[in-house]
Image: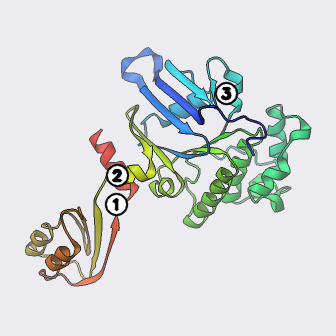
Amino acid sequence: MTEKYWEIPHNQLALQIEKLSKIYNGKVNNIALNDISLNVPVGSIFGLLGPNGAGKSTLINIISGAVIKTSGRVCVWGLDIDKYRKQSKLAVGVVPQELNIDAFFTPKETLNFHSGMFNVPKKNWRTDELLQLMGLTDNAETYSRKLSGGMRRRLLVAKAMVHSPPIVILDEPTAGVDVELRQKLWNYFKKLNELGVTIILTTHYLEEAEFLCDHIAIINKGKIVANETKKSLLSKSNQKVIFITLTDDKITKKDKDCIKNIGNVKICKNKIEIYFDPKYTSMDRIIEIIYKTDLKILDLSTTSVSLEEVFVNLIKDN
């Protein structure tokens, strides 16, 4: 989809950031971004994660041309944003968290209107193609106010694609939607990426980032605290977790002291989570310890530590 309009940069980087800083109002205590460097490979789904106030929005706004940086260098699809401001803006489509759609326009009218706003020649309008891609063909002539929440979300993605940008930024794209709809949207995002679009995703749903992204950067207090492949990031923690559900919430001090020999323990009513390092504690040993207690176990399962746990630990340490 994108190669028809944009040549891939020679360095295979959709986004290149070097020593980027942003200080608001020239005040030292208003540093939003502090000397960050970041590369986003062409064709990736790149997760940009961080707590509220970490600097994600400022970074997105600089990339999309809505905010002027204080210092550093930013290249969008090989275009330096200082030298090629207009062209670099056109290389990005932003899908905002807010549903900023005119309620009295149909999806078809919305996409046609925004195609004109981006000065796309009428012969190159991709309205029908985008409606089909986002599963909106059957509702092309329906007023936007009558569309479901999921359809509006998909319309936002289509709207961001009218000028065929090679990069799409998804800013909290599934905020406030139910689980079923979230999974459907994930499939649309995957489909978009398979067509060659580089996606930069910001989200507070760590499960979403773990499912979609192949590369993840974590930003905290204006600094990058992690920047690597998802596989590499998850491998930083050698921990596993045992989840135990008891038949009741009667846990004695003796039981607590016993299971603490396994690892870090969290207890909430009749739920127990035990975090342990399999290098040093075998499952045989764990089962042996658990069965020495008087705990009445209803269910027991084990899993690897999630991206959420890695994220929390990185933010806590930085």
- The answer to whether one can see residue 302 in this image is yes
For residue 310, the mark is 2
Q: What residue type is labelled 3?
A: Ser
Q: Which amino acid does label 1 sit on?
A: Val
Q: Check whether the beta carbons of the residues at disc 2 and disc 3 lie within 8 A of each other.
A: no
Q: Which residue is drawn at 55% across and 56% down?
A: 176
| Residue at the extreme right | 123
**Location of mark 3 (residue):** 88
Query: For this rendering, which residue is in front, 269 or 46?
Result: 46
Query: For this rendering, which residue is in front, 248 or 22?
Result: 22
Disc 3 and disc 1: Cα gap in Å?
A: 39 Å
| Residue at the extreme top | 26
Q: Check whether the beta carbons of the residues at disc 1 and disc 2 lie within 8 A of each other.
A: yes
Kindly indicate the quadrant of the structure image that contains residue 82: top right
Mark 3 Cα-neighbour bin, 10 Å: few <14, some 14–19, many ≥20: many
Could you tell whether 156 is left or right of 262 in the image? right
**Is residue 292 placed above or below 138 in the rendered structure?**
below
Q: What residue type is labelled 2?
A: Val
Mark 2 Cα-neighbour bin, 10 Å: few <14, some 14–19, many ≥20: some
Kindly indicate the quadrant of the structure image that contains residue 251: bottom left
Disc 1 and disc 2: Cα gap in Å?
A: 7 Å
- The answer to whether one can see residue 247 in this image is no
**Location of mark 1 (residue):** 305
Find residue 117 and report its horizontal and vertical position in percent: 80, 33
Find residue 169 and report its horizontal and vertical position in percent: 61, 41
Q: Which residue is drawn at 80% across and 48% down?
A: 104
Find residue 298 and report its horizontal and vertical position in percent: 29, 84
Disc 2 and disc 3: Cα gap in Å?
A: 34 Å
